[in-house]
Image: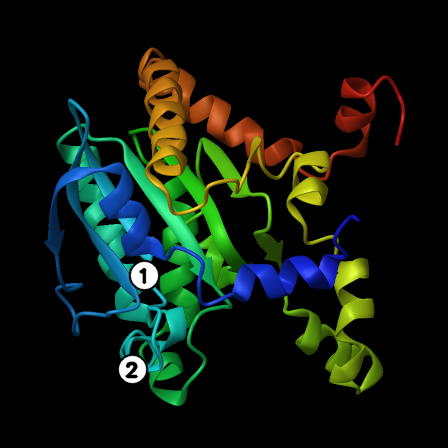
């Protein structure tokens, strides 16, 4: 029996799913965490630092939700503040300087929407990441491993390759938020989820992601090995491009999203 869109939403939010730190520990070695945005403070909702992907130094950035209630509260339930996005950008610019690829793990219902976050420039922090990632002179791969909510997720997803776990979601708004706005009834979230086209299959069909990763053996050594192997292969391909080719392909990747004529050509005219 196939899962409905809202079943995928529930699966993406499951507290038993691996979090960002689980992926870092399972895939990379010698991870050295770096803290702070050099402007305000550190943000525990985003974890980042330098690691080894077998023999390749990389910069790893992950949105971390935590598993227990105590952990989730300490991590703002994976809802980053502006300083989190600025920390991520600082690490990306450092990666560019030292010619390290950037790998991001995204799992957030959205950026933190408190008054303090707005006062410290939440919108500007997200916009800066979008702009800077588009021209970052080093390969970027982003993996949507749970929830991919609005600009909070997009701020770490302007990449050369974007992959999704099969039960991850990617949407401009939560189904509950959408239902509340459209019908003034959050109980219609399941109906909204179908309309939002937020599943991995929808994203692949729309050219928003390049690959869907299976969730069999999720959390086991074989699961992380599958992702590690895929990352090494993809980074080798991206590393063979010149800086000019890399940036041009990244630019055209995003230009093609939503281009119905281009999608029609790729599918032989079938919509």
Question: In front of the other: label 2 or label 1?
Answer: 2
Query: Which corner quadrant of the image does residue 58 belong to?
Result: top left
- Helix, strand or loop under label 2: helix
Circle 2 residue: 70
- The residue that appears at 65% across and 31% down in the rendered structure is 256
Q: Which mark is residue 210?
A: none
Query: Which corner quadrant of the image does residue 170 belong to?
Result: bottom right
User: Mark 1 or mark 2, which is nearer the start of the sequence?
Assistant: 2
Q: Residue furthest right?
A: 270
Query: Residue 80: x percent and y percent?
Result: 36, 69
205 w.r.t. 5: above or below: above
221 w.r.t. 186: above or below: above
Query: Residue 98: x percent and y percent?
Result: 13, 31
Circle 1 residue: 85
> Is there any visible trace of residue 241 in the rendered image?
yes
- The residue that appears at 41% across and 37% down in the rendered structure is 223
Query: Which corner quadrant of the image does residue 141 belong to?
Result: top left
- Helix, strand or loop under label 1: helix
Query: Residue 208: x percent and y percent?
Result: 62, 39
Q: How many marks?
A: 2
**Disc 2 to disc 1, C-alpha distance:** 23 Å
> Is there any visible trace of residue 150 in the rendered image?
no
State the residue in front, 2 or 103: 2
């Amino acid at each position: 029996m196939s899962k409905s869109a809202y079943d995928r939403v529930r699966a993406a939010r499951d507290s038993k799913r691996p979090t960002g730190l689980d992926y870092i520990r399972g895939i990379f070695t010698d991870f050295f965490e770096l803290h702070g945005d050099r402007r305000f403070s550190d943000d525990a909702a985003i974890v980042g630092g330098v690691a080894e992907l077998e023999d390749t130094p990389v910069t790893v950035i992950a949105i971390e939700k935590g598993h227990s209630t105590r952990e989730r509260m300490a991590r703002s339930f994976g809802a980053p503040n502006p300083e989190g996005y600025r920390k991520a950008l600082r690490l990306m610019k450092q990666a560019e300087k030292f010619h390290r690829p950037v790998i991001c793990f995204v799992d957030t219902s959205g950026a933190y929407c408190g008054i303090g976050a707005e006062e410290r420039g939440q919108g500007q922090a997200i916009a800066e990441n979008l702009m800077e990632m588009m021209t970052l002179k080093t390969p970027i791969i982003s993996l949507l491993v749970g929830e991919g909510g609005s600009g909070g997720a997009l701020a770490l997803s302007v990449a050369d390759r974007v992959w999704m776990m099969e039960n991850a979601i990617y949407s401009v708004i939560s189904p509950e938020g959408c239902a509340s706005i459209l019908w003034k009834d959050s109980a219609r979230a399941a109906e909204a989820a179908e309309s939002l086209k937020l599943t991995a299959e929808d994203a692949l069909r729309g050219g928003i992601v390049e690959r869907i990763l299976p969730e069999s053996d999720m959390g086991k050594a074989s699961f992380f090995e599958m992702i590690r192997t895929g990352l090494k292969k993809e980074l080798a391909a991206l590393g063979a491009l010149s800086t000019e080719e890399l940036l041009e392909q990244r630019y055209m990747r995003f230009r093609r999203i939503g281009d119905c004529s281009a999608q029609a050509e790729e599918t032989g005219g079938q919509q």
